[in-house]
Image: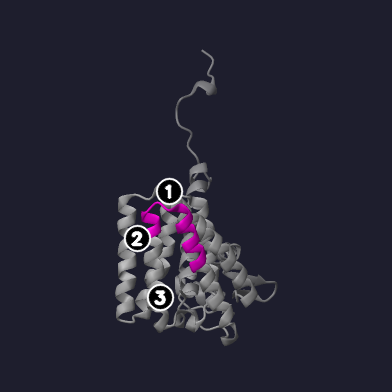
Amino acid sequence: MTYNAAFDSRPTVMSESASTPVDSVLALVQRTSLTRLVGEALEKMILAGELPPGSKLNEVALAERLGVSRGPLREAFRTLEESGLIRQEKNRGAFVREIELSEAADIYEVRAGLDATAGRLLAERATPEQLAVLREFAAGMQRAAGVNDVDAFHALNLAFHDRIVEMTGNAALLDVYRRLVKQLALFRRRNLLAPQAIPHFAEEHSAIVDRIAAGDAAGAAEALHAHARGGRQRMLRDGELGSLPVADEKRA
């Protein structure tokens, strides 16, 4: 009988030095996952103010701090540049972006539209469970206002608006919204959330929840749009104060 190798069912043995498709896929997954983790760590440092606007990103120091090589770090830089958090200059390196007043004002205008869209969508589809979560946020902000806790109010405020957009279930809307909010974090002013103004903002948030709960799509959209536009007006009013480290700032 003539031997035909094509019908040999025995597995092919490869040398240890040979690269298999599985090896390539695993290497790609590992590299991608590492780049994502490095990017997330850098993003947290930027948004927390550890890497303030205008600061240069030291590759050697960051690679040592994060325990990675400079390859994944540079890939993470590219991702952060695409998201608008850093800028890279040829022969100079990477820097945390500085947002000018005019750009921040433009971003606020877009955000106002996104907030309005989210309010309209959520008023049309909010579940009882979602409404309960929003009411708890509003109550928490009322409590923070009652004791003049600016830090607690600020954190609840950011989470409240993020959850409204998230609850719409519109992934594209959420992606654009979060990208803009992160960019605005590079441009925050100290007195955009003055302690004496907290009770007013808390009432605005409660009114927003009431309109969403009532299924008032137009009213919810209007309330959220006006709320965001108010933030833009305060920012423009106080623009002459100059940029401050993110960790020291509060925004309504």
Q: Secondary structure at mark 1?
A: helix
Tell which residue pokes out farthest to the bottom in this image. 241
Marks 2/3 in contact by CB < 8 Å: the verdict is: no
Left or right position of 195 against 136: right
* Circle on res. 200: 3
Camera-side residue of 175 and 60: 175
Q: Which residue lies at the image location 38% right of the left edge and 80% below the top edge?
A: 150
In this rendering, the label closer to the viewer, 2 or 3? 3
Q: Secondary structure at mark 3?
A: helix
Which range is magenta? 210-227
Residue 124 badge: 1
55 in relation to 9, above or below: below
- Where residue 84 appears, x then y in whole percent? 59, 66
Residue 214: give x, y in percent of width and height: 37, 54
Of residues 10 and 88, the one drawn nearer to the viewer in this rendering: 88
Classify residue 248 by image quadrant: bottom left
Instruction: Give me the residue at 45% from left, 31% from top.
Output: 11
Task: Mark 3 or mark 1: name the one nearer the start of the chain.
Answer: 1
Q: CA distance from mark 1 to mark 2?
A: 15 Å
Residue at numbered disc 2: 134
x and y percentages locating residue 195 in the rendered image:
40, 83
Q: Amino acid at mark 1?
A: Glu
Q: Tally the marks.
A: 3
Please give the name of the residue rendered at 31% of the width and 51% of the height, measured from the top-left corner: 128
Task: Give the class, few, some or many, for how many residues have Cα within 10 Å of label 2's Cα (few <14, many ≥20).
Answer: many
Instruction: Say if the magenta span includes residue 211.
Output: yes
Under mark 3, the amino acid is His
| Cα–Cα span, label 3 and label 1 | 26 Å
Is 218 contained in the magenta span?
A: yes
Q: Position of residue 76 (x, y in %)?
A: 54, 64
Residue 240 at least partly seen: yes
